[in-house]
C-alpha cells in the first residue's frame, strides 16, 4: 500500500489517484446532484475537513471549488462544495448508481478506491466505541456505517479482506429496513485504523485514534467561501 504524497509537492494526480478519491467521497457523505455530486457540512467542527475535501476537488478538477452557504429544504443552513462536472465524475456516478435509484455497491466500483479514498469514506461514515467493564475500557469496536443490504456489505467485506487484509463482520444497523453495517473488534480495528493514519488530516485524527482521550485538532488552512 503506497504512502500518501504531499499535496503541496504533487500538483498533478494520476487518474488512479483521482478515481480513488472521488470514489471515496461518493461512498461517503457526498450527495447526488444529477450526474454530479456535492459535499455538505452542517457543523462548524467540520470546516477543516471540508477544506481538506475542497483541496482534493480542486486538484482533481483543475478548477476552483468555492464553498457556498446554502439552506436545505427544512430551513437548516449549511456549507456546500459543488465541484464542476468532469467526465471522470460522470463515469463513476454511472458505475455507482442505477438509473434514478440509489447506490449499488459492486466489486468493480470498490476496485476504484485508493487508501486516500478509503480514508475519506471512513471519516464520513465510520465510528468507534470503547467498551467498558467495571468502569474500565477493555475493548474497542470500529464500525463502517454503510446502511446497506447484507449482500452489498458482504461485497465490501470481501474487498477489505482481499485488498487490506482486514476481516470485517456484519452488524444490524436498521432492523426496519433490514440494512447492515460493518463491525470489527479491537485487534482488527487497530490494524485498520493504523493503515488509514497517513491519509487523515490533523483535524480528523480523533476519529481513528484508539486512545479514549484524544479530541479534534484544529487545522491551519482557510476555507475558501464564495461571497
Image: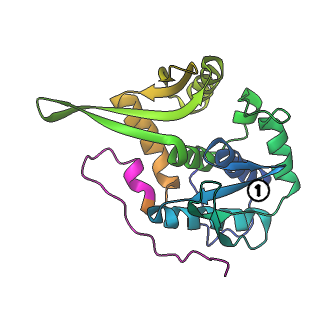
Q: Position of residue 140 (x, y in %)?
A: 31, 33
Which residue occupies 78% across, 33% down?
101
Q: Residue furthest left?
A: 134
Q: How many marks?
A: 1
Which quadrant would residue 186 be assigned to in this image? top left
Can residue 146 be found in the magenta stretch? no
Q: Nearer the viewer, residue 132 or 13?
A: 132
Q: Is residue 100 above or below residue 23?
A: above
* Prevalent SS, magenta region: loop
- Between 8 and 44, the one lying in front of the other is 44
**Residue drawn at 14 percent across, 35 percent down:** 136
Residue occupying image coordinates x 85% and y 58%: 86
Q: Which residue position is annotated with label 1?
A: 14
Circle 1 residues within 10 Å: few <14, some 14–19, many ≥20: few
Q: Horizontal and vertical percent for residue 27?
A: 65, 41
Is 205 part of what is drawn in magenta? yes
Q: Magenta part of the protein: which range? A: 204-227
In the rendered image, the quadrant that contains the C terminus is bottom right
Coordinates of residue 33 in the picture (x, y in percent)? 78, 51
The answer to which image quadrant residue 11 occupies is bottom right
Image quadrant containing the N terminus: top right
Where 2 falls versus 50 (above or below)? above
Identify whether 114 is placed above or below 97. Answer: below
Residue 77, image x, y percentages: 57, 64
Determine the residue positioned at 48% across, 61% down.
Answer: 43
Residue extending farthest to the bottom is 227
Amino acid at each position: 500500500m503506497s504512502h500518501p504524497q504531499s499535496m503541496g509537492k504533487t500538483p498533478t494526480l494520476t487518474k488512479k489517484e483521482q478515481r480513488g478519491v472521488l470514489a471515496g467521497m461518493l461512498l461517503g457523505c457526498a450527495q447526488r446532484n444529477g450526474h454530479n455530486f456535492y459535499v455538505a457540512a452542517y457543523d462548524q467542527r467540520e470546516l477543516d475537513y471540508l477544506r481538506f475535501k475542497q483541496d482534493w476537488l480542486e486538484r482533481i478538477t483543475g478548477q476552483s471549488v468555492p464553498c457556498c452557504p446554502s439552506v436545505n429544504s427544512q430551513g437548516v443552513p449549511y456549507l456546500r462544495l459543488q465541484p464542476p462536472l468532469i467526465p471522470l465524475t460522470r463515469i463513476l456516478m454511472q458505475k455507482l448508481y442505477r438509473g434514478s435509484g440509489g447506490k449499488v455497491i459492486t466489486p468493480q466500483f470498490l476496485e476504484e478506491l485508493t487508501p486516500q479514498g478509503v480514508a475519506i469514506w471512513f471519516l464520513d461514515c465510520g465510528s468507534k466505541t470503547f467498551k467498558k467493564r467495571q468502569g474500565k475500557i477493555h475493548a474497542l469496536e470500529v464500525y463502517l456505517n454503510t446502511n446497506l443490504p447484507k449482500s452489498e456489505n458482504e461485497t465490501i467485506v470481501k474487498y477489505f479482506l482481499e485488498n487490506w487484509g482486514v476481516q470485517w463482520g456484519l452488524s444490524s444497523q436498521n432492523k426496519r429496513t433490514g440494512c447492515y453495517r460493518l463491525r470489527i473488534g479491537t485487534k482488527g480495528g487497530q490494524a485498520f485504523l493504523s493503515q488509514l493514519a497517513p491519509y487523515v488530516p490533523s483535524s480528523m485524527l480523533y476519529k481513528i485514534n484508539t486512545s479514549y482521550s484524544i479530541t479534534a485538532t484544529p487545522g491551519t488552512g482557510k476555507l475558501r467561501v464564495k461571497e
